[in-house]
Image (spheres, coloured by chain):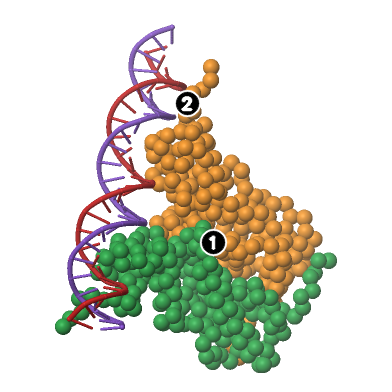
Chain colours: A green, B orange, C purple, D red
DNA sequence: CTAAATAAGAAACTATTAGTATCTTAATTC
DNA sequence: GAATTAAGATACTAATAGTTTCTTATTTAG
């Protein structure tokens, strides 16, 4: 006998898949429960029972994808570079790859809604992401220190997060993220910053 | 005799003012023609005759404000610093001030809509802004060069725009833009980057 | 100064759609 | 096998975006 009705986790997965597909094709601003229900071959009421708004559904679907795919966590990257530069390239390359997945879901559109609602889930996702990125960068800097390559590893968190912020900004504003830009960032900004000897302010 | 009906530019200004006020208080996502009409003490149809969507109205209102107030253009700033560091502080401080005005209008919410529509007006606004910022930074670097302070003025545009991008990212993600962060950016990133002697890649 | 043209403003109307409620029945549990 | 739970279908309600029509104030032209 064939199943006529899905339920529970099974059904939920179908809804998440439909949600992500619509996010990709039409974007968050055109995401509504009726379309998701149609695509997932279920009913509007089923979705209303589970989520309050298309926003919370979208967040849930994305979180689910992150959870199941564990998408390119930068802190689980095994670094094989023989220099700070190589390690940084590896790290930020991985970061870009994992970000591309989000670009597909047009999360930039979600951001507006999130800031409006002072959404805590999004804030949490961001700060979790930041923690992972910080960790990864610290690892890179430690390796460089051991190699005897650099002077500074005590940079403030804001500055350590700068490369990730900058790349995310490019993503949000739909500016292409190329390998070349990555090299510019590393050679012209990050390496000088991490190598810089003193933090004396030449205020004259 | 008192005017009973405003028209033309007069009326348009009233609509712009109402639009900006609603952007401030409720944000773009809650901007609709009916509310604007009410607040501007005019009629919905008057607005529909002029603009297609709340989005285009919002853009028009913001553009109008930029035009009339010429809001803190960084390229018209007269620099008085006696060092690169001081000039950078002055420039980026001014930048932050002018950005705050936009923050009030919650343009982050607009961004989602803009990226969805591949909006050219926004793209144009951004690239105009970039040109102004580049210009201003070049001026700062030139002054430093004349003082004999720095080595590099031939950085690629992407890198010259980095401080502005970073600050904008903070704005969009509602992270506080403090004077302290500005100093970190300048001391730990920009000065090292602009001073860095060689661009040899230490790939071993 | 008057007639014609233009555009503001009011109001009613239509269509869409978000959200809710109700009911039937499949699937699960006890 | 009865009772419970939840899926899925359908219909309903309320809100509102957008349109249309009409009246009249204001401007322009003769």
Please tell me which residue lies in front, A170 or D5: D5
Inspect this view and state whether residue B198 appears.
Answer: no
- The CA span between labels 2 and 1 is 40 Å
Residue at 63%, 90% in the rendered image: A143
Q: Is residue C18 left or right of residue A203?
A: left
Please tell me which residue lies in front, A107 or B182: A107
Provide the residue designation for mark 2. Answer: B5
SS of the residue under disc 1: loop
Residue at 57%, 73% in the rendered image: A127
- Residue A98 drawn at (x, y percent): 46, 78
SS of the residue under disc 2: loop
Report the disc number at residue A118.
1
Inspect this view and state whether residue A82 appears.
Answer: yes
Q: Callout 1: few (<14), some (14-19), or many (20+) C-alpha neighbours within 10 Å? A: few
Residue at 72%, 66% in the rendered image: B180
- Residue B119 drawn at (x, y percent): 43, 55
Q: Is residue B142 left or right of residue D17?
A: right
Q: Quadrant of residue B199?
A: bottom right
* Quadrant of the snapshot with the C terminus of chain B: bottom right
- Residue A77 drawn at (x, y percent): 51, 87
């Amino acid at each position: 006998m064939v199943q006529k009705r899905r339920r529970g986790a099974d059904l939920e997965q179908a809804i998440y898949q439909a949600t992500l597909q619509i996010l990709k094709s039409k974007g968050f601003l055109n995401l509504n429960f009726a379309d998701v229900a149609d695509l997932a071959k279920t009913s509007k009421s089923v979705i209303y029972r589970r989520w309050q708004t298309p926003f919370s559904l979208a967040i849930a679907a994305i979180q689910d994808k992150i959870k199941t795919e564990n998408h390119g966590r930068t802190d689980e990257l095994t670094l094989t570079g023989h220099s700070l530069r190589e390690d940084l390239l590896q790290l930020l390359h991985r970061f870009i790859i994992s970000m591309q997945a989000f670009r597909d879901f047009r999360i930039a559109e979600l951001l507006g809604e999130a800031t409006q609602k002072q959404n805590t889930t999004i804030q949490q996702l961001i700060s979790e992401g930041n923690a992972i990125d910080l960790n990864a960068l610290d690892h890179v800097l430690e390796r460089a220190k051991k190699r005897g390559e650099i002077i500074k590893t005590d940079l403030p968190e804001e500055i350590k997060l700068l490369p990730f912020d900058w790349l995310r900004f490019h993503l949000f504003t739909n500016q292409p993220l190329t390998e070349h830009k990555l090299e510019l960032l590393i050679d012209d900004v990050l390496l000088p910053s991490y190598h810089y000897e003193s933090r004396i302010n030449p205020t004259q």
